Image (cartoon, helix red, strand yellow):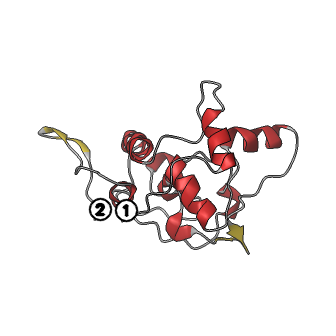
Amino acid sequence: MWPRWGTGSLGFVPAPAARSLGDVYRQIPVVECRGHCVESCGPISMTVDEAARLRGRGVDIPPLLDAVAAIDRGEDYYCPALEDGRCRVYEDRPTICRLWGATESMRCPHGCTPEGALSQAESHRLLRLAAELGGGMVDRFDGSSEARQDVAAGTDSPATGVD
C-alpha cells in the first residue's frame, strides 16, 4: 500500500524532502491507466519546467486560461498530447495529470484509482511543491500574462528534467 502523508495519531507526519519534480512525482500513487478517460483530459496548468519538457517532446499544451477561453467561445478542446485516445507523453505528464485518479477528490470514473489515494490536502501540497521546484506555474491567476508569454516565446527557464 502507498504511504500516506499528513496527520496521524501522533500528529503531523512530514513527507520526505523533495528536491526535484521527480521527488514530487514519486510521492503520487501510480495509476494503472487503461486509456478510458480521454474525455477527462481537459485544460490544465503546469509548471514552467513541465511545459518546457513537453515542448521538447513536440507537445505544446496551451496555457490553462487560453484553453478555458476557447471552451467559453464554444470551441472544442482536446489535449494536444492525445493521440488515438492515449497520452503520448504519459511518462512525462505534468503533476496535475499524475494526480488525476490518484486523488480521492479526482477519482477516475473508470476505476483506475489506486488503493491509498491521496487526500485533497495532500494533492494541494504536492501541487505547491511542484510549482516551487518546477520554476513556478505557467498560468498565474492574478491576471499576469508574463509567464504565459515566456513559455509561448520559449524563453522560460530550461527544463531541468526529472531524475
| Residue 109, x across and y down, in percent | 59, 59
* Residue that lies at the very extreme toward the left in this rendered image: 10
Residue ID at (62%, 47%): 44
* Three-letter code for the amino acid on which mark 2 is drawn: Trp
Image position of 10 (left or right of 1): left
| Residue 107, x across and y down, in percent | 52, 54
Q: Please state which of the two labelled residues, at mark 2 or mark 1, is closer to the viewer.
A: 2
Residue ID at (37%, 43%): 129
Crowd around label 2: few <14 · some 14–19 · many ≥20 (10 Å): few
Contact (CB < 8 A) between labels 2 and 1? yes
Residue ID at (58%, 53%): 51
* Three-letter code for the amino acid on which mark 1 is drawn: Glu
Residue ID at (70%, 67%): 82
User: Mark number for residue 115?
Assistant: 1
User: Mark number for residue 22?
Assistant: none
Residue annotated with mark 2: 2
Image position of 30 (left or right of 97): left
Q: Is residue 106 above or below residue 137?
A: below
Q: In this view, does 46 lie above or below 81?
A: above
* Residue that lies at the very extreme toward the top in this rendered image: 142
Q: Is residue 161 above or below residue 135?
A: below
Label 2's element?
loop
| Residue 28, x across and y down, in percent | 38, 57
Q: Let me know if residue 107 appears in the view.
A: no
Image position of 34 (left or right of 84): left
| Residue 131, x across and y down, in percent | 45, 42
Image position of 71 (left or right of 101): right
